């Protein structure tokens, strides 16, 4: 039966494909098709992992029997796990999946686990329902053995038309999609500017989040349509709807194709103002997309993504190689490398204290606060960035600054990193520019120390909105309050641009507002001339810039900024965009 679920539109476009229900465990394992001739070997790999776990459990049982103080429950627990391991549901069905569907062993096991746990969730008896944890533990044991043998297995999915359906995805999960070819994704949880949504936009794949119960309502392999522009998910569409969306998808692709003609045009307004359009990237491999749109440079390199999905922090040399590869790929163009912005929704196993439960992670130990508290991590990154600066035009950008003393401490750390490199006789750009992100309202309201001590500013509107309106950007329950057009938000942005301009300090916007074509004229009218966004958004923003006249916009936007009434403000914006 066909039905429609509404959520938050976070990444535009249309995707048509088959559902792949993903759980956390599934994301942790490789998913790929085994070649016909390798099936026997894959079965043997699975069998030997099961045998290894059986031996492990046997040893545990002997240990439990031998140690006098061991509780009787321990033997019973080992027996239960051994029984589960031998049950055909776990010992046989995955083998069928390997043989018949050519799934790799881990994938087969996780799929079967999901089937079984879903059945357990339906059991009324609470005690029996809870037994599913035993099954999960047994499967995890087998997975551990399998992964131990093949930790680096290349992850591949079946087709490009897969649509990932998950209850929740962390930014660390989502970034892994960069290596996969997937059509789009939908989640039950998440806000429009959560980093999960941001990564979707950077991948330029349609996505809808905040769907509440989609994961429970959708079945594996079911046909889905994601309308990422309207925030709609259509499950099991009928033929007529399917045809309609196929047509719209083709039209959108044509429009996108037409925009490509603007690649080599200059981003100049009708009244001759040159506007700098740069891009935001998460990984060095994003650089190909940067070249596709011929961006002015990188306005934001979110380096924390290099730290995710791993057990060890990347060392100085590894970071240096990553930064240098980006810098060398863009000769003559500025590359703005942001120092680590870990914390809140961007976490990593490698981070010290990662398991710590923070009462309010968005207001807690993140970004520059974390770096200043962990000087060896910060210094290693600063040295890596400095070393990369020898190969092009590198700028350092520091997130989440609010206090004058944080700016001072950051500059002291930078001076220390420089002196360490001097001592080691390693060359770098002595005059590397240092900028600060304006994403805490306090910073926007008291810009004195920023414009005195820093070379440039970049407004992080995602966090600025979160902190100004006191709403967690990752929480779909308050997503309806997330409003870039709130008069308070607009005034803070305008104030920052104007203060920077008066002080002769360049100001950019690198939050999601910079890539929203309905806000381009508003920002131009505030005097903004540097925008940084996902590569996929750049040509559309360039089109807006080329159609705009800043000399007309300034007066109109000044009037809009005096408006307190949201409805009137919106009316004025619609007029500004229409003429
Ligand atoms: C922002 O807050 O607007 C920003 C660009 O940084 P991030 O989204 O990575 O927090
Ligand atoms: Mg931010």
Image (spheres, rainbow, N blue to C red):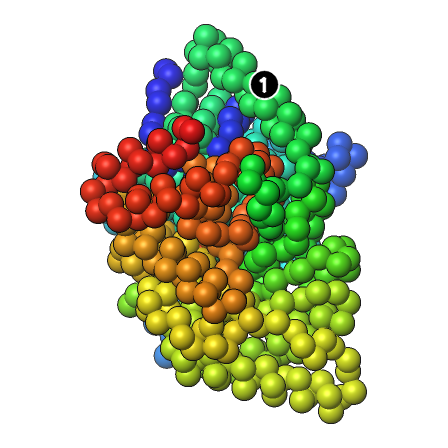
* Left or right, 7 with reference to 229: left
Please name whichever residue, 281 or 28, is drawn nearer the observer in this view of the structure.
281
Residue 437 in sight here = no
Whole-percent x and y of residue 462?
41, 53
Whole-percent x and y of residue 30?
62, 47
Please determine whether, in this image, residue 229 is positioned above or below residue 41. above
Please determine whether, in this image, residue 258 is positioned above or below residue 42. above
Local secondary structure at mark 1: helix
Whole-percent x and y of residue 2?
38, 17
Residue annotated with mark 1: 250
How many numbered circles are shown? 1
At a point 39% along the width and 71% down the height, the residue shown is 447
Please name whichever residue, 164 or 115, is drawn nearer the observer in this view of the structure.
164
Please determine whether, in this image, residue 249 is positioned above or below residue 300. above
Q: In which quadrant is the C terminus drawn? A: top left
Question: Can you tell which quarter of the image residue 420 is in?
Answer: bottom right
At a point 66% along the width and 41% down the height, the residue shown is 266
Please name whichever residue, 333 or 391, is drawn nearer the observer in this view of the structure.
333
At a point 70% along the width and 44% down the height, the residue shown is 294
């Amino acid at each position: 039966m066909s039905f429609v679920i509404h959520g938050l539109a976070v990444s535009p476009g249309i995707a048509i494909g088959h559902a792949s229900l993903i759980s956390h465990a599934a994301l942790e394992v490789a998913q790929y098709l085994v070649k016909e001739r390798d099936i026997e070997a894959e079965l043997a790999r699975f069998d030997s992992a099961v045998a290894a776990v059986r031996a492990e459990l046997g040893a545990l049982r002997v240990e439990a029997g031998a140690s006098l103080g061991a509780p009787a429950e321990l033997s019973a627990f080992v027996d239960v796990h051994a029984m589960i391991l031998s049950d055909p549901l776990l010992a046989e069905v995955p083998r069928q999946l390997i043989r018949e569907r050519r799934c790799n062993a881990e994938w087969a096991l996780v799929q079967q686990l999901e089937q079984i746990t879903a059945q357990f969730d339906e059991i009324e008896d609470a005690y029996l329902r809870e037994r599913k944890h035993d099954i999960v533990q047994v499967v995890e044991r087998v997975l551990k053995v399998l992964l131990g043998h093949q930790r680096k297995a290349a992850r591949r999915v079946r087709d490009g038309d897969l649509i990932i359906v998950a209850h929740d995805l962390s930014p660390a999960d989502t970034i892994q999609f960069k290596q996969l070819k997937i059509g789009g994704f939908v989640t039950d949880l998440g806000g429009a500017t959560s980093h999960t949504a941001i990564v979707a936009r950077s991948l330029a794949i349609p996505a809808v989040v905040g769907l509440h119960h989609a994961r429970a309502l959708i079945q594996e392999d079911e046909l889905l349509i994601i309308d990422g522009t309207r925030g709609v998910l259509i499950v099991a569409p009928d033929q007529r709807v399917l045809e309609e969306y196929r047509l719209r998808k083709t039209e959108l692709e044509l429009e996108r194709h037409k925009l490509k003609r603007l690649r080599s045009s200059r981003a100049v307004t009708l009244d001759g103002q040159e506007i700098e359009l740069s891009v935001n990237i998460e990984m060095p491999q994003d650089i190909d997309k940067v070249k596709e749109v011929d961006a002015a440079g990188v306005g934001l390199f979110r380096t924390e993504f290099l730290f995710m999905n791993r057990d060890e922090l990347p060392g100085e040399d590894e970071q240096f190689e990553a930064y240098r590869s980006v810098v060398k790929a863009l000769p003559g163009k500025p590359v703005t490398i942001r120092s680590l912005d870990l914390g809140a929704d961007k976490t990593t196993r490698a981070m010290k204290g990662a398991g710590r439960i923070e009462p309010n992670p968005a207001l807690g130990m993140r970004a520059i606060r974390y770096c200043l508290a962990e000087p060896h991590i910060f210094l290693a990154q600063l040295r890596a960035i400095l070393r990369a600066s020898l190969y092009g035009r590198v700028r350092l950008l520091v997130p989440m600054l609010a206090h004058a003393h944080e700016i001072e401490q950051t500059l002291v750390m930078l001076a220390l990193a420089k002196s360490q490199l001097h001592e080691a006789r390693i060359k770098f750009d002595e005059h590397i520019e240092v900028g600060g992100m304006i994403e805490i309202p306090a910073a926007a309201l008291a810009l004195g120390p920023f414009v005195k001590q820093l070379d440039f500013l970049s407004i992080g509107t995602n966090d600025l909105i979160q902190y100004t309106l006191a709403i967690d950007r990752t929480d779909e329950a308050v997503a309806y309050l997330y409003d870039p057009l709130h008069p308070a938000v607009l005034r803070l942005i305008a104030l920052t641009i104007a203060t920077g301009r008066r002080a002769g300090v360049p100001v950019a916007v690198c939050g999601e507002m910079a890539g929203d074509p309905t806000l381009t004229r508003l920002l131009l009218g505030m005097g903004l001339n540097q925008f940084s966004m996902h590569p996929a958004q750049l040509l559309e923003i360039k089109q807006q810039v080329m159609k705009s006249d800043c000399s007309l916009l300034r007066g109109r936007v000044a009037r809009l900024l005096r408006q307190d009434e949201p409805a009137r403000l919106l009316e004025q914006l619609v007029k500004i965009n229409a003429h």
